[in-house]
Amino acid sequence: MWRRVSSLTQFVSPTKSSSILNQVSLIHVYACTFLYGFDSSIYIEDLGIIHYTDTQLAKFFFFHVLSGGPGSGKGTQCEKIVETFGFKHLSAGDLLRREIDSKSEYGSMILNTIKDGRIVPSEVTIKLIQKEMESSDNKKFLIDGFPRCEENRVAFEQIIGAEPNIVLFFDCPVEEMVKRVLNRNQGRVDDNMDTIKKRLKVFEALNLPVVNYYAEKGKLHKICALGTEDEIFEQVWPVFAACKQVI
Ligand SMILES: Nc1ncnc2c1ncn2[C@@H]1O[C@H](COP(=O)(O)OP(=O)(O)O)[C@@H](O)[C@H]1O
Ligand SMILES: Nc1ccn([C@@H]2O[C@H](COP(=O)(O)OP(=O)(O)O)[C@@H](O)[C@H]2O)c(=O)n1
Ligand SMILES: [Mg+2]
């Protein structure tokens, strides 16, 4: 069934999007929300160029979020998901590290925040994620390590205008996370005992409300993150396989 949308203004804020391309991109975000929230499909008459069925629309914009403590295996499982299901992987931490390397205006603030195990202001991280989403040909996104707190979550919804379709939470014992991070060997400034202690405190204080929020919405899939990488992927695979017909 088609849902008719008489005006674009209820979907696209002019301050957020000046070009038609940007508008189209934002519409996909909103349309996605409609697809899963209220209606089965959307017809946008103002532009006269978008006319999607459910499946086409879902192909255009669909995203999952992976959350879990430091070292719980998010990045590792993302690689497997990308290989098997063809998502575009967006790691918030990688985007922030790339921003440090590019010596941008926020670089030193981001570096100090990461070294100290704190969370970078949401607008900065969301801007990086948004840029990647808008410039990607692949509209199936895996967002890894975001949102890390309620403020991240609320700001993302306000700026992007949509919620993830599915959220995976990697549940891992603290000792295992510490062991993995200290053995990670990727030369990261935050992979040391001092920072990991701070990161775990931040995680314990801020993660639960986010997880509870998605659980109440029926979007949360808890994954036991103990075991081999393949054993963990055996739990992850069915979540993605179940929605394969729309992605
Ligand atoms: N199931 C697992 N068992 C043991 N080590 C793992 C497992 N999954 C990932 N690792 C290793 O643990 C470290 C942290 O994994 P990573 O995927 O970077 O976690 P995160 O992105 O959640 O911080 C990496 O060195 C990775 O190779
Ligand atoms: N949403 C996010 C994600 C990461 N970060 C920062 O980036 C650091 C590394 O994040 P990450 O996702 O790469 O870390 P792992 O969980 O992969 O170990 C975090 O400890 C935060 O300092 C953030 O501020 N906000
Ligand atoms: Mg990671």
Image (cartoon, grey):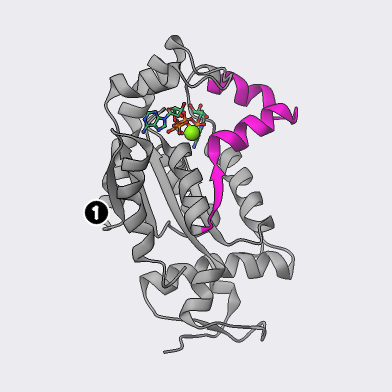
Can residue 198 be seen by looking at this rendering?
A: yes
The residue at label 1 has a CB less than 8 Å from ligand 2: no
Q: Nearer the viewer, residue 218 or 184?
A: 184
Quick check: is 94 in the magenta stretch? yes
Q: Quadrant of the N terminus?
A: bottom left
Q: Position of residue 137 (x, y in %)?
A: 66, 62
Q: Position of residue 28 (x, y in %)?
A: 56, 69
Circle 1: residue type? Glu
Q: Nearer the viewer, residue 129 or 156?
A: 129
Q: Is residue 95 above or below residue 132?
A: above
Instruction: Give the residue pinned by disc 1.
Output: 216
Q: Is residue 199 above or below residue 89?
A: above
Q: Is residue 53 above or below residue 73?
A: below
* Residue in the picture at 50% in, 44% down: 79
- Helix, strand, or loop for circle 1? helix
Q: Position of residue 93 (x, y in %)?
A: 55, 34
Magenta segment: 86-114
* Residue in the picture at 58% in, 70% down: 27
Residue farthest bottom in this picture: 1
Quick check: is 222 in the magenta stretch? no
Instruction: Characterize the local packing of mark 1: few (<14), some (14-19) or many (20 or more) Cα atoms within 10 angstroms.
Output: few
* Residue in the picture at 67% in, 33% down: 98
Can residue 12 be seen by looking at this rendering?
A: no
Per the picture, the main secondary structure of the magenta-coloured stretch is helix
* Residue in the picture at 40% in, 22% down: 180
Q: Position of residue 104 (x, y in %)?
A: 74, 31
Q: Is residue 65 above or below residue 173?
A: below
